[in-house]
């Protein structure tokens, strides 16, 4: 016959192991959640790239059209009053602020994008920024962009290359583009 005391101790030890395992899992989940929040809340660094104007146009939507596809393939809802929008088509041609390895990867990604015929464009309502009427196909632009963790380039805004980069030339980044 075994004494009763060791059984009580074994029971308490097993219970303590289960509690410790549960606390460990909860702690790991909290750390993962915190890392996710930090990664999504910290601002990304903006960079500059040079770009070339491909074309510009004004697009008018029919009242029956509810959405259009943006340059990243996302469906964007057409809000009431946005039946007419300006578009500036461009391609990124250099990333002068980046080191050569990163720069070469970004240039290769842009070539792949061109091969897939995914032309970059910014858009907005009204007549667009003041400088829009003065740019033509072939003109140089300065693009301000962020690079996602996956390496994708998200262009926030563009302006003529003669203006000071990051001033946005009085043109705020489009709210649907800048999250």
Image: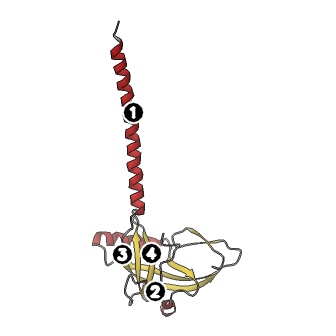
Q: Nearer the viewer, residue 90 or 60?
A: 60
- Residue 20: x and y in percent read 36, 34
Q: Nearer the viewer, mark 3 or mark 1?
A: 1
Label 4, on which residue? 155
Residue 23 left/right relative to 66: left
Residue at 42% across / 51% down in the picture? 33
Which mark is first along the chain, 4 or 1? Answer: 1
| Circles 2, 1 touching at the beta carbon (< 8 Å) | no
Cα–Cα span, label 2 and label 3: 18 Å
> How far apart, in angstroms, are the residues tagged by discs 1 and 4?
49 Å
User: What residue did someone put label 1 on?
Assistant: 19
Do the residues under discs 4 and 3 have CB atoms within 8 angstroms?
no
From the top left corner, tell me how far across and down residue 15 is, in percent: 39, 27
Scheme of image coloration: secondary structure
Q: Quadrant of residue 38?
A: bottom left
Residue bearing the label numbered 2: 170
Identify the disc placed on residue 47: 3
């Amino acid at each position: 016959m075994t004494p009763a005391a060791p059984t009580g101790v074994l029971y308490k030890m097993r219970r303590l192991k289960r509690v410790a395992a549960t606390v460990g899992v909860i702690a790991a989940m909290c750390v993962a959640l915190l890392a996710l929040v930090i990664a999504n809340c910290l601002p990304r660094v903006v960079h500059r790239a040079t770009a070339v104007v491909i074309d510009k146009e004004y697009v008018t939507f029919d009242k029956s059209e509810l959405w259009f596809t943006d340059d990243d393939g996302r469906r964007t809802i057409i809000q009431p009053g946005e039946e007419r929008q300006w578009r500036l088509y461009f391609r990124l041609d250099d990333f002068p602020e980046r080191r050569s390895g990163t720069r070469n990867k970004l240039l290769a990604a842009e070539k792949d994008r061109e091969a897939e015929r995914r032309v970059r464009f910014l858009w907005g309502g009204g007549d667009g920024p003041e400088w829009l009427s003065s740019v033509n196909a072939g003109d140089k632009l300065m693009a301000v962009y962020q690079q996602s963790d996956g390496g994708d380039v998200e262009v926030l805004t563009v302006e003529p290359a003669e203006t000071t980069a990051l001033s946005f030339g009085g043109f705020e980044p489009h709210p649907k583009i800048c999250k």
